[in-house]
Every structure is written in structure tokens, then in C-alpha cells.
Image: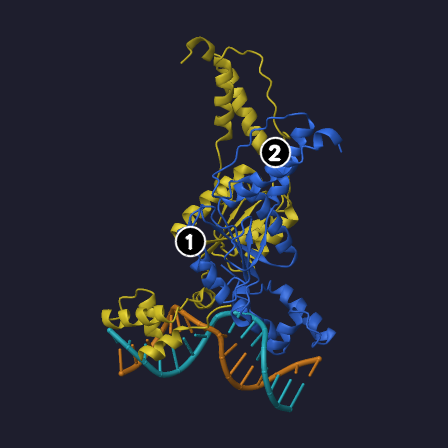
Chain colours: A yellow, B blue, C cyan, D orange
Amino acid sequence: MDNGITISDIAKLVGVSKITVSRALNNSSLVSEKTRSKIIQVAKRLNYRRNLIAKSFATRRTQTIGVIITDITNPFFAEIIKGIENTAKQKEYHLLLGISGDNIEEEKRCIEDLLERRVDGILLVPTHKKYDDLEHLYILKKEKVPFVLVSRHLEEINTDWVMTDLRKGSYELVKYLIRLGHRRILFIVGPKEVTHSKYRIQGYKDALKKQIWILTKD
Amino acid sequence: MDNGITISDIAKLVGVSKITVSRALNNSSLVSEKTRSKIIQVAKRLNYRRNLIAKSFATRRTQTIGVIITDITNPFFAEIIKGIENTAKQKEYHLLLGISGDNIEEEKRCIEDLLERRVDGILLVPTHKKYDDLEHLYILKKEKVPFVLVSRHLEEINTDWVMTDLRKGSYELVKYLIRLGHRRILFIVGPKEVTHSKYRIQGYKDALKKQIWILTKD
DNA sequence: ATGAAAGCGCTAACAA
DNA sequence: TTGTTAGCGCTTTCAT
């Protein structure tokens, strides 16, 4: 599976210690340019490939962030993943993917999995189903796992979150229709106990309240 | 980040050796039921969580498969990811995600990343752009990394691959139109140097050759 | 600028 | 059934 070359092999060939090889390969300033270039040269010749598992084990950091979404088939989330992956890549981070299927039990399992795998942090799109069991999120807080909620915000959990401005979105939408001259606007939303729906309805109402639009046309 | 509990802690508390704890937690039959239940009980009490990094390091297996796709925004690939994740989960495997952006250099980088992270295998949707530099795939072969090509097949690389039957697909498509009575059928495909297009054109021609359809109607 | 020793948390191989 | 020893490949700490 791997070619089996480790820093020890390089160290022997170059005639230095493992740690010097490690330093050279990690751009530490504690290595002379001469030894560094020698080391890098040998590393290339042997097709050395760092073992990130060993590194993670030693440093206790995985350079990995776990991403849990409800449904990758939803273009909205696909787009989000794309964005995450893009900036993660720039920071040399990797993505461990979990799909909850919008199911609370599965969501919990995903989180446990990611913790076992020692991700450095978690991005979570929580289930949209109503649930009162927030234990898994409290665990994240308690164990100081950095995490941010995506696309849904839970009042009870004090953590960072990102979300589209739904209220403003539907406000703009309705405003647009009003400007076109429409007066009787039917607004169809999802289940009204879901916060998303509430925000949207709010925006709808906002717009209706300002029927002023009809007159001003900007 | 983690709660810091290791099998050593459990071992001390229960009064057994680490390896016994390890065995108990891994459902080995080399532990008496009595000790096992004691161990599991203590593990639960301490909120023990296995360190999969340490395990991977020791066993040299990560239980992770790398998936490289060109574009997650494409519903076709999103659907594929969903399927992969679904069966991976059942086998207690995890997905490390790479997005190549349909770019050969990025594809190479993704592969190198996954190898550094010591994935157990790779599923690759290769770039659809024409390229002659297959070095990275040869490396996979040489180092015996299990990998399978998805949605594109490269003649030069002797490996497993999965793909939709494009030829049959467009054959069915055209056959359908013919049966409806259409005679002059325009067929629009992508760049014709892409194998995908070739297959589709082939299916188109297949159908035209059998204009028999018109008569038989099944 | 370089190195020696220890350790990260687990499992493999061998004993008992 | 249980334990001992060693080791996975790297980094950390402390010397030199």
C-alpha cells in the first residue's frame, strides 16, 4: 500500500538523526540549508511520503474537519460542501464527510464517528426535524470541540452559526411581486414549526406591511 | 478536545492489562464474559472514546476510503457520493472527500493527499479532459493501492471501473423516438474526442440501424 | 544547528 | 484466559 519509506530511512542515508529530517521536511529554521537540501534530495529519490497518521498521532491534530450534512443530493448543500472543500484545501485541511439523512440518531452517530477519528472541528447542518435531545451538542461544548452550526440555528446551544438571511430573502421576493403589481399573494412554506418557515413568513409579512412599494416603484 | 481517557485508565481501574481492555472492547473471544462486562461498564462510566488515529497507526489501516470527484455540484456525482457513503457506513468505513474541479493537476494533488493520509482505497472519477499523463495512476498500481475508476474508463490503466451503459442509454432513447414515429433525429453530444460522446453516438447509430422498430412496435 | 530519549494510544507476537 | 514486550512513524523536550 505505501512504499514503506520513513524518515528513519532518510536519516540513515543522509547520516543525520530522524529529528533533523523531520525538521528539514517541515521547513524548520533549525536546519542548515546544506543539510536540508541534502535531505530533501534523498527524500525525493526514495519517493518518501509523509505518514499523516503517524503525524496526527504524535501531534494530536488531524488537520481534518468533519462535515455533517443532511442530504448531499440537495444542490444547496452540495454548493456548501464545495465552498468548504475549497477553503479547506487552501489551509491544507481535509474533509471527512458524514451524511445524516436528516435523522437525529444518524446525526449523533456521525458526531461520535468524527470524534473517534479526532477531527479538529466540526461543521454541522443539524436535522431540520424538531427534536429536544441536544445531548450530543452539549457534549461538543463540554469537550471543547470547535463546531459551527450551518443553515440552522439552535437557541439553546451557544455556538457560532452561519445561515442565509431567509427573512430578507422572502422579503425581497414578495417585494418584487408587489412591484409588479400583484396584490393577492399566496405564500407557501414548509411546516410552520420549523424556524426556517417562521423566518420566511416574517419576511413575507414585512413586505406586505410596506405596500408603499406599489406607489414608489423605487 | 477529547476527554483524555485511554484504555490504560480503564485497565488500571479494572485491574487488568491494557491488552485485555483492548480485547474486550474489540469483541475478542479471548476475554471472559465477566471481565468484559466489567471493562465495558467502566468504559461507559468514564465516557471512554476509542482513538481511531492511534488504532490506525497501530494497525496500519484507516478504515477510510478516499473519494475524488470532479464536481460535487453535479447531481449525478452527488448521487454517487450518497450511494458510496451509504454502503461505506454499513461497513464502518469513512469517506475522505477530494474535489478535483475536473483539473488534472488537482486530481494528482488529491491522490497524493489521500495517500499521505493512508486511505485504504480510492474511488476516482477521473478528469474528463483529455490527458496523456497517467503517472499518478501508475503510482497507484505500483504501490498496490486498491482503486476503482468511476464514470470513466481509461484503456491504458488495468483496473476495475464502474460506469453507466451510455451506449445502451442513448440507444434506448433513440429507439423510443423512432417508435414514436420520428424519422429525422438530430443527436447533440459533447466534444466528440471524449469517450462518453463516442459511446452515446454509438448507441444512436445502433438504434438507427434497426429502423425495424417502426414496423414491429415491439 | 543537531541529537537522544521518551512518548502519543493502540495492537501484534509471543509467553505464561 | 491473561499479560509482557515491543513497535507503528512521527514530534516533543531537553541536552549538547
Discs 1, 2 touching: Cβ within 8 Å: no
User: Which labelled disc corresponds to residue A194?
Assistant: 2
Q: Residues within 10 Å of mark 1 (few under 14, many from 20)?
A: few
Q: Residue at x 42, y 53 (%)?
A: B132
Q: Residue at x 57, y 43 (%)?
A: B199
What is the secondary structure assignment of the residue under circle 2?
Answer: loop
Q: Residue at x 31, y 69 (%)?
A: A41
Position of B177 relative to A81 (above/below): above
Q: Nearer the viewer, residue B140 or B121?
A: B140
Q: Nearer the viewer, residue A129 or B5?
A: A129
Q: Residue at x 62, y 59 (%)?
A: B92
Position of D13 relative to A65 (above/below): below
Q: Quadrant of residue C15?
A: bottom right
Q: Nearer the viewer, residue A144 or A194?
A: A194
Farthest residue to the top: give it.
A215
Q: Chain of mark 1?
A: B
Find residue A16 and report its horizontal and vertical position in percent.
31, 78
Q: Which residue is mark 1?
A: B132
User: Which labelled disc corresponds to residue B57?
Assistant: none
Find residue B164 and report its horizontal and vertical position in percent.
61, 46
Q: Quadrant of residue B168?
A: top right
Asked if one can make out residue A72 in the rendered structure from this viewpoint, the answer is no
| Kind of residue at badge 1 | Asp
